[in-house]
Image (tube, rainbow, N blue to C red):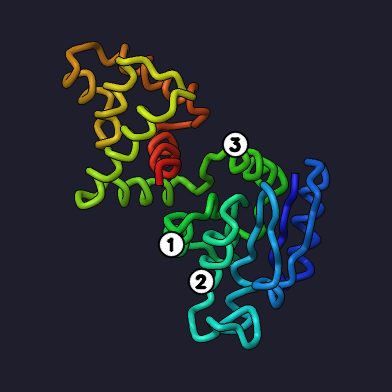
């Protein structure tokens, strides 16, 4: 599997490449100043050192047609739009929920500290390559609230219903579909049980089955995964 490392910091490049060796990735380092010329072919994962691009210039490429645009806009256009087969992860020297939300909501599959430990680095790549989203607890909660905000709730519900009816890869039962329809509104197990007229223990079993079938760790990631796949 291909792993692209986008950074201008030699220490960071060495650190990430060293961590990735044990996972047997084919590593390619991308010069931030040549980013617009780089071609990303096939599937793979891309690690982007956000701090490198932010400190480079208003645009990673001199004389770029988008040099007057903010670096982040340029980055999102180049990576998420033009190279959608690559699972992009943003890494920041000083991560914040606000910055993380902007990247995850724009198509990045993960957001984490630049100096993540080796064990978390491996877990990060494993999670992202399974088409899940990686983010810290506070960030995933904020992203979930954003998806469930009133103006967006109908769209998310429609998207997830669309996933259920157009794709049978998860094999949800009719009852699991009913539980999911209520779960995506942010309802608790007790509220779902009351709505469906069954025990809370039964709801817990259905939620556990939904998590297992989608390969997600909790209900937050379940909602984000299904909504993101439908986007």
Badge 2, how many Cα within 10 Å: few under 14, some, many 20+?
some
Could you tell me residue 218's position as x and y percent?
44, 32
In the image, taking residue 88 as reference, residue 140 lies left or right, namely left
Count of number-bearing discs: 3
The quarter holding residue 123 reads: top right
In the image, taking residue 185 as reference, residue 115 lies left or right, namely right
The quarter holding residue 53 reads: bottom right
For label 1, the SS is helix
**Disc nearer the start of the sequence (2/1):** 2
C-alpha gap between disc 2 and disc 1: 9 Å
**Disc nearer the start of the sequence (1/3):** 1
In this rendering, the answer to whether 135 lies above or below 208 is below
Q: Quick one: 174 or 189, which is closer to the camera?
A: 174
For label 3, the SS is loop
**Rendered residue at 31%/15% (across/down):** 174
**Rendered residue at 66%/58% (across/down):** 115
The residue singled out by tag 2 in the image is 72
**Rendered residue at 63%/62% (across/down):** 48
Could you tell me residue 39's position as x and y percent?
70, 63
Q: Quick one: 32 or 218, which is closer to the camera?
A: 32
Is there CB contact under 8 Å for labels 2 and 1?
Answer: yes
Could you tell me residue 188's position as x and y percent?
26, 29
- Which quarter of the figure is the N terminus placed in? top right
**Rendered residue at 49%/31% (across/down):** 217
Is there CB contact under 8 Å for labels 1 and 3?
Answer: no
C-alpha gap between disc 3 and disc 2: 25 Å
Could you tell me residue 121's position as x and y percent?
67, 47
The residue singled out by tag 1 in the image is 102
Q: Which mark is residue 130?
A: 3
Badge 1, how many Cα within 10 Å: few under 14, some, many 20+?
some
**Disc nearer the start of the sequence (3/2):** 2
C-alpha gap between disc 1 and disc 3: 22 Å
């Amino acid at each position: 599997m291909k792993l692209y490392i986008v950074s201008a910091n030699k220490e960071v490049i060495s650190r990430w490449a060293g961590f990735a060796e044990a996972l047997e990735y084919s590593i390619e380092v991308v010069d931030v100043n040549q980013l617009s010329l780089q071609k990303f072919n096939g599937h793979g994962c891309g690690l982007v050192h956000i701090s490198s691009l932010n400190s480079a210039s208003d645009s990673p490429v001199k004389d770029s047609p988008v040099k007057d645009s903010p670096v982040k806009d340029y980055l999102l256009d180049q990576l998420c739009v033009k190279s959608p087969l690559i699972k992009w992860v943003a890494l920041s020297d000083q991560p914040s929920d606000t910055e993380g939300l902007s990247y995850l909501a724009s198509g990045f599959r993960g957001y984490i500290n630049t100096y993540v430990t080796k064990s978390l680095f491996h877990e990060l790549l494993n999670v992202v390559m399974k088409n899940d989203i990686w983010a810290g607890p506070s960030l995933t909660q904020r992203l979930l609230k954003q998806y469930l905000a009133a103006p967006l709730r109908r769209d998310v519900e429609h998207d997830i219903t669309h996933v259920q009816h157009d794709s049978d890869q998860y094999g949800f039962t009719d009852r699991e579909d009913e539980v999911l329809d209520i779960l995506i509104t942010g309802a608790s197990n007790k509220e779902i049980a009351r709505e469906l007229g069954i025990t809370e223990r039964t709801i817990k079993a259905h939620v556990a089955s939904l998590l297992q079938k989608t390969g997600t760790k909790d209900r937050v990631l379940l909602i984000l995964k299904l909504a993101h796949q439908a986007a």
